[in-house]
Amino acid sequence: MSGRKSKKERRRLIMISFLIISLSAFLIKSVFSDWVQILNNNSQIHALNNKKKSLLDEEATLKAEATKLENTEYVARYAREKYLYSMPDEIIIRVN
């Protein structure tokens, strides 16, 4: 046999090479798109964790405020300071 390959062998080699290259390209694209999705998910997780933390802080603040509002003396003082309500004998003087 000579060192040259026949046309049939070359076609088969080209076809196998094409299939291997195509499969490799598909796998690389697939892995890359999955990697990008993982990065997006990680950034969303980080953002949602930050939002959760701020909401938990806000919840704690609101619970503390709700507890304070159960005290009638606090409510009366709050209404006087915030909305300038006064008792019948009181005069409100606003100082800026």
Image: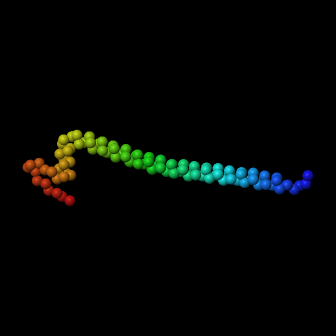
Q: Is residue 51 left or right of residue 32?
A: left
Q: Residue furthest left?
A: 89
Residue 54 location, x and y as percent?
A: 38, 48
Q: Residue furthest front?
A: 8
Q: Nearer the viewer, residue 94 or 44?
A: 44
Q: Report the label total.
A: 0
Instruction: Look at the image and name its color scheme.
Output: rainbow
Q: Residue furthest right?
A: 1
Residue 40 location, x and y as percent?
A: 51, 51
Q: Nearer the viewer, residue 44 or 49?
A: 44
Q: Is residue 2 left or right of residue 44?
A: right
Instruction: Residue 62: name its quadrant.
Output: top left
Residue 39 location, x and y as percent?
A: 53, 51
Residue at 19% of width from left, 52% of height from top? Answer: 83
Residue at 10% of width from left, 51% of height from top? Answer: 90
Q: Is residue 11 left or right of residue 36?
A: right
Residue 36 location, x and y as percent?
A: 56, 52
Residue at 21% of width from left, 40% of height from top? Answer: 71
Residue at 20% of width from left, 44% of height from top? Answer: 74
Q: Quadrant of the C terminus?
A: bottom left
Q: Is residue 48 left or right of residue 70?
A: right
